[in-house]
Image (tube, rainbow, N blue to C red):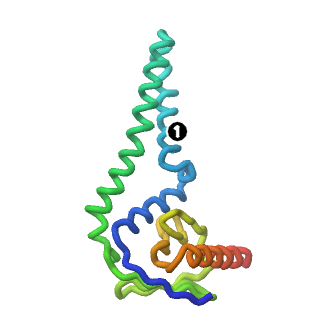
């Protein structure tokens, strides 16, 4: 299973990392639009009492509030990601640095710039696969990223994802 993966960690990788980290939270599985719909529904539900004297008005106002919140929330989330990538990303020590991951039988070793790390398979709590890549979650705040573009083909990526899931599952079963 020994495999070495190398890539440069850029702003798009940072945004993908933010999104993957967000997916771990309690509302993460709903996705951007699902969270917006839930927030819109809650806004309508809590504002409905004040307009109960005129039910048709409550319905119209509720529809407007739901539409605005459902549209504005994902746009705000997207703009927030772009701002973070533009302003915060360059300040990180791993910004625009070369990343090397060595996926081995016992662990995953990483090297970013001059910083090296070693992560045992038991330490990985969850494997998240998105269209951007594979993310190994050590916690909600710590993720290790393998972008799809770092592998030569879609088949190579699928093979790696399968092997990583198998290793994580086997390590979790041994705990």
Please tell me which residue is depicted at 54% across the width and 59% down the height of the picture.
24
**Where does the N terminus fall, quadrant-wise?**
bottom right
In the picture as drawn, the residue positioned furthest to the right comes out as 173
> Where residue 62 sits: x, y (%)?
47, 24
Task: Answer with the quarter of the image where residue 172 lies.
Answer: bottom right
Q: Residue furthest top?
A: 53
Which residue is tagged 1?
Answer: 38
Q: Position of residue 55 (x, y in %)?
A: 51, 12
Q: In which quadrant is the C terminus drawn?
A: bottom right
> Is residue 138 among what the camera can see?
no
Is there any visible trace of residue 67 in the rendered image? yes
Residue 15 in the image: above or below residue 63: below
Residue 78: x and y in percent read 37, 51
**Residue sitting nearer the eye, 109 or 1:** 1
Instruction: Say which of 53 and 95 sits in front.
Output: 95
| Lateral position of residue 127 relative to residue 117, left or right | right
Circle 1 residues within 10 Å: few <14, some 14–19, many ≥20:
some
Q: Which residue is painted at 73% across and 75% down in the image?
A: 173
Residue ID at (44%, 31%): 67
Q: Is residue 61 above or below residue 77?
A: above
Q: Is residue 64 left or right of residue 1?
A: left
Find numbered disc 1 in the image and state the secondary structure of the residue it sits on: helix
Please give the count of numbered marks on the rendered protein: 1
In the rendered view, would you say 108 is above or below 165? below
Residue 113: image location, x then y, percent: 35, 85
Instruction: State left or right for residue 168 relative to residue 13.
Output: right
The residue depicted at 45 percent of the width and 74 percent of the height is: 149
């Amino acid at each position: 299973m020994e495999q070495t993966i190398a890539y440069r960690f850029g702003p798009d990788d940072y945004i993908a990392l933010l999104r993957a980290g967000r997916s771990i939270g309690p509302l993460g599985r709903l996705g951007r639009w699902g969270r917006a719909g839930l927030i819109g529904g809650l806004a309508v539900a809590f504002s409905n009492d004040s307009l109960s004297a005129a039910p048709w008005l409550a319905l119209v106002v509720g529809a407007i509030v739901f539409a605005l919140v459902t549209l504005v929330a994902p746009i705000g989330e997207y703009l927030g990601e772009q701002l973070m990538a533009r302003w915060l990303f360059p300040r990180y020590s791993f910004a625009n640095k070369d990343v090397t991951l060595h996926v081995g039988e016992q662990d995953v070793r990483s090297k970013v710039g001059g910083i090296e790390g070693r992560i045992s398979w038991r330490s990985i709590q969850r494997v998240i696969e998105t269209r951007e890549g594979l993310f190994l979650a050590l916690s909600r705040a710590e993720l290790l990223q393998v972008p799809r573009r770092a592998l030569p083909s879609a088949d190579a990526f699928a093979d790696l994802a399968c092997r990583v899931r198998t290793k994580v599952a086997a390590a979790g079963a041994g705990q």
